[in-house]
Image: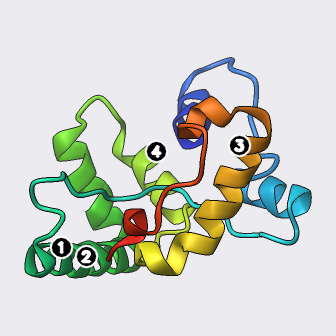
Amino acid sequence: MASLLLWRAGQTAGAPALHRGQSLEQAWRGAFPAQPSLPQAGVMAAARVADDAALCSAVNQAYAASARWCVEHPAECAALVREHLPHLPQPAIETAIRGTRLESRSAQQARPELEALYRLLADRYPQAIGGSLPPAGFYAS
């Protein structure tokens, strides 16, 4: 969203100059130095396919390859994104890609960061996570 706002401000005559002050990741690291990595997104399998190890593995591998490709080719990745989200300007998409930590890790690898986030939520808003941490099966790869 910040990338889109910055891009639009740069395209609008007379608009005030906007600058990116701090990233959410930087703010997170400052607030929670014991758990400096902020999980950004995840891919989940529907119950009817979650037990299909071959399918889940194929999706994980394809997602990891796609994330690497986007990091290596941000302009081309932005063009693909724009094909599916034509209302977003390609330069803003590319800026967002360049400013995002795109990495793919399994749920097991991300579990410590996820559980740190869930514990923070549980301390203040336990209803946001159903009242307890997810069971171990939630992190199946």
Query: Image quarter for residue 79?
Result: bottom left
Q: Tell me which label, 1 or 4, sits earlier in the chain.
A: 1
Q: Which image quarter holds the N terminus?
A: top right
Q: Residue at x 40, y 62 (%)?
A: 138
Residue type at tag 2: Asn
Q: Earlier in the sequence, mark 2 or mark 3?
A: 2
Q: Position of residue 51 (x, y in %)?
A: 15, 69
Q: Position of residue 46 (x, y in %)?
A: 18, 51
Residue labelled with disc 3 = 122
Q: Is residue 88 above or below residue 117?
A: above
- Helix, strand, or loop for circle 1? helix
Q: With respect to residue 92, does 108 lie above or below?
A: below
Q: Earlier in the sequence, mark 4 or mark 2?
A: 2
Q: Quadrant of residue 122?
A: top right
Q: Which of labels 1 and 4 is toward the front?
A: 1
Q: Secondary structure at mark 3?
A: helix
Nearest to viewer (mark 4 / mark 2): 2
Residue beneath label 2, please? 60
Q: Is there CB contact under 8 Å for labels 2 and 1?
A: yes
Question: Residue sitting at 35 percent across and 46 percent down?
Answer: 90
- In the image, 131 versus 65, the foreground residue is 131
Q: CA distance from mark 2 to mark 3?
A: 28 Å
Camera-side residue of 34 and 132: 132
Residue 128, placed above or below residue 84? above
Tell me, for residue 56, which label it has, or none.
Answer: 1
